[in-house]
Structure formats: structure tokens, C-alpha cells
Amino acid sequence: MKKLSNTLRILIAAATIGIFSSSAHAGPGIQAWKTLASESQFKELKAGSTVAYVCSTCKSISEMAIKSQDLAMELCKEGGHASCPSCKQVTKVVTKRARNDAPTHTEISYVNDKGEACAFIATRPKM
């Protein structure tokens, strides 16, 4: 009986530690990030802010410092280029717009040389 009691105590302690350790993490998850998909969102970026460059080719997330408003606008200019800080793959900036949408409603995407979307830029959540 004593052996069963000790085993039960160990299991309860391990479960309690597991519950508390799973709730302690470094910060909010990827779902808290806001993808920058329009020119107006890039206009809101200020010098000194940081964004995350998420590359699906090398499966990395890299921080990019926004040094000026002009640099932020280069990241969303049609035909411009952005490169992954990790794997150095150069992506082309493409704007997409539905046929009936107003010209102000465009979606920015980053494509590789095959025309496949391979990256996006997001703002980091406030911690």
C-alpha cells in the first residue's frame, strides 16, 4: 500500500510540474503576429521598429530592423525585392488585387523565381 501511495504522489507531482511548465513560454505564439499585407500597414512602420521576416523556404523567422520609412516602403513596392536574412533567397514583391476591388485594396506577397509565395513579413507582438 505504501508503494502505491508513493507512486501516486510522484505521478501527481509530475502532472503538476507538467501543467505549470507548459504554461510558461517565451511569449505569444505565431497567431498573435500581424501579417503586413497592405501598403497602409507598411506606412504605419516607424524608423527603429522591427518586423519579422518569415521564410517558408528555409523555415526560419528573422528580425529585420526598419531603419527608415523609405526602407519600409521598399518592402511593399511592386516589383521590388526582399531577401531572407537567413538563407539569402531573394524574393520579388508582388501585389495582388481582385478584379472588382478598388486600387487601394491590394495584398502584398513575396514570391520566389517560380512565382510561388514563399515568405511574409509580420509585426512582432508587444511583450
Image (tube, rainbow, N blue to C red):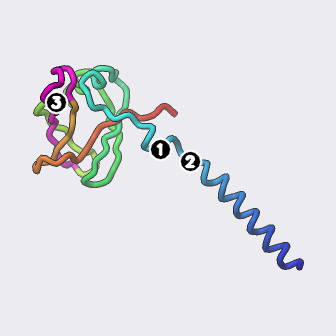
User: Which residue lies under the disc numbered 1?
Assistant: 29
Badge 2 vs badge 1, beta-carbon distance below 8 Å: yes
Rendered residue at 85%/73% (across/down)? 5
- SS of the residue at dot 3? loop
Secondary element type, mark 1: loop
Rounded to the nearest angstrom, the CA distance separating label 3 from label 1 is: 29 Å
Q: Nearer the viewer, residue 1 or 60?
A: 1
Examine the rendered structure and indicate whether residue 87 appears above or below residue 108.
below
The secondary structure that dominates the magenta segment is loop
Mark 3 or 1: the one toward you: 3
- What residue is shown with label 3? 97
Q: Residue 15 location, x and y as percent? A: 70, 61
Residue type at mark 1?
Gly
Specify whether residue 96 is painted magenta: yes
* Distance CA(mark 2)–CA(mark 1): 9 Å
The answer to which of marks 3 and 1 sits earlier in the sequence is 1
- For the view shown, which residue lies furthest in the front direction? 100
Mark 2 and mark 3 in contact (Cβ < 8 Å)? no
Which of the two residues, 99 or 21, is positioned nearer the viewer here? 99
* Spot occupied by residue 17 in the image (x, y as percentages of width and height): 69, 58
Label 3 CA crowd tier, 10 Å (few <14, some 14–19, many 20+): few
State the residue position of label 2. 25
Give the Cα separation between the discs numbered 3 and 2. 38 Å
The magenta stretch is 88-106
Residue at (28%, 25%) from the top-left corner?
Answer: 42
Left or right: residue 44 compared with residue 95: right
Q: Quadrant of residue 123?
A: top left
Above or below, 47 against 7 in this view is above
Three-letter amino acid code at disc 2? His
When asked about the image quadrant of residue 19, the answer is bottom right
Q: Residues within 10 Å of mark 1 (few under 14, many from 20)?
A: few
Q: Give the percent coordinates (x, y) of residue 50.
A: 37, 32
